[in-house]
Image: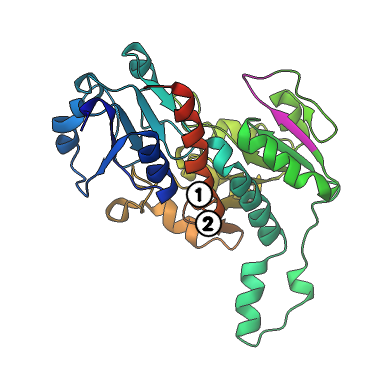
Amino acid sequence: MNTKHKVLFIDSSHPFLRDQLEAMGFFCEAFEEKNPEFYRQIANQYIGFVVRSKIALDESILPLATQLKFIARVGAGMENIDVLLAEKLGIVCLNAPEGNRDAVGEQAVGMLLALLNKLPQVDREVRQGIWRRAENRGTEIKGKTIGLIGYGNTGSVTARKLSGFEAEILAYDKYKRGFSNSIVKEAAMEEIFERADIVSLHIPLTPETDYLVDQAFLSRFKKPIVLINTSRGRNVKTVDLIAAMKSGKVTGACLDVLEFEKFSFEDLQADALPDAFRELLAMPNVLLSPHIAGWTHESHYKLSAVLVEKIKKLKLF
């Protein structure tokens, strides 16, 4: 066995990824171990790491991975990888936002429709024999102005999913210009603050987007808004969101992600949940899901398929 061709699967993925890497000539290994120290001890054996979010790939492990040529993130976000350090060490960092962008876009639209039409609430009521129609009138998307913050893979796909609802779609992206088309209008944040009825986040978690949505941010909207977050929990400061909902500045929230998730996104920090979380649970105009927007049956496969093609292009041997 050539140790220079070994790939370590730190997290699980669709079997297609491992099967294809082995067909390409890589030798793949995986362990149930969760202790980062274990991975530090064996890091120098591998040409590639396959990860999701189990451990941080930072200065404590990357310099030890002396043969490492690539890191393949089975997902979109790269916040658990020190990308700058990896690049300095000659390690290529790959991710697969193309693989789950449709899933995220559909979840954003689905959550919005469910919230505006009170579907979770009315389903519970009907099951209990409660038949309230006037009290459960819904709100239409048609005619509203939707502001997308971030216009990368998920932002652009979400715009496409929303395009049939006859709403005006504005999008702001700090790092893109000239993307207006028949579906979306490129806009400055000032225009979104001025005109948006619905705001959807499509941004990574970076130092500049950590708690981007806070009291100061929310106070700048001229109209009450509905907020959708399918990005990262710490893009939104929950205590400030709750205050904005109590004041009427935010009339509803669709949250697939929460700032109280564990590092791996696999669960909540159950031993450290603050009062803000409990307040959120009590609000009928909040719709929650457990970080599953990009977690469909189809995206499970597509994330791996995207990475296979990107690894092939590296032509490592």
Task: Judge from the rendering whether residue 23 lies leftward or rightward of residue 133; answer left or right.
Answer: left
Marking on residue 199: none
Q: Residues within 10 Å of mark 2 (few under 14, many from 20)?
A: few
Marking on residue 297: 2
In the image, residue 12 sits, relative to residue 39, either above or below, namely below
Q: Residue at x 68, y 65 (%)?
A: 118
Q: Amino acid at mark 2?
A: His
The foreground one among 151 and 193 is 151
- Span colored in magenta: 169-176
Q: Residue at x 79, y 26 (%)?
A: 180
Q: Is residue 122 magenta?
A: no
Asked whether the residues under the numbered discs 2 and 1 touch, taking CB atoms below 8 Å apart as contact, a structural biologist would say yes
Image position, residue 44 (x, y; %): 19, 25
Q: Is residue 174 magenta?
A: yes
Q: Amino acid at mark 1?
A: Tyr
Q: Residue at x 67, y 68 (%)?
A: 119
